[in-house]
Image: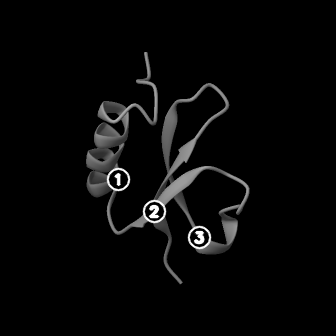
């Protein structure tokens, strides 16, 4: 099974893009995905930042 891309919200309210297997995603974690490509995940993260769901990374 191939890995897919997820956006994971960190404790600092920032969103990181990680390539994970679906069984690596914890249900208690705030995440979005899966996405088929890193580029799609980046575009979605931009949308999450604009919507105020994530803080931008400095």
Sequence-earlier tag: 2 or 1: 2
Whether the residues at callouts 2 and 1 have beta carbons within 8 Å, the answer is: yes
Which residue occupies 49% across, 37% down? 15
Tag 1 and tag 3, C-beta contact below 8 Å: no
Q: Which residue is mark 3?
A: 21
Question: Could you say which quadrant of the image residue 11 lies in?
Answer: top right
Camera-nearest label, 2 or 3? 2
Is 16 left, or right, of 52 in this rendering? right
Relative image position of residue 6 (x, y in whole percent):
48, 57
Query: Is label 1 in a helix, a strand or a loop?
Result: helix
- Alpha carbon of mark 1 to alpha carbon of mark 3: how far? 15 Å
Measuring 26% from the left and 47% from the top, which residue is drawn there? 43
Q: Earlier in the sequence, mark 1 or mark 3?
A: 3
Q: Which mark is residue 33?
A: 2
Compared with residue 34, is residue 39 higher up or lower down, i.e. above or below? above
- In the picture of the structure, the residue carrying the numbered disc 1 is 41
Give the structural element (helix, strand or loop) at label 3: loop
Mark 3 Cα-neighbour bin, 10 Å: few <14, some 14–19, many ≥20: some
Instruction: Give the percent coordinates (x, y) of residue 36.
Output: 34, 69
SS class of the residue under badge 2?
A: strand
Q: Is residue 44 left or right of residue 29?
A: left
Considering every residue shown, the one lying at the far front of the view is 51
């Amino acid at each position: 099974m191939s890995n897919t891309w997820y956006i994971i919200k960190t404790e600092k309210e920032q969103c990181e893009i990680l390539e994970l297997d679906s069984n690596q995603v914890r249900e208690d974690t705030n995440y979005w995905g899966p996405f088929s490509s890193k580029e799609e995940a980046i575009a979605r993260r931009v949308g999450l930042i604009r919507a105020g769901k994530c803080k931008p990374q400095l």
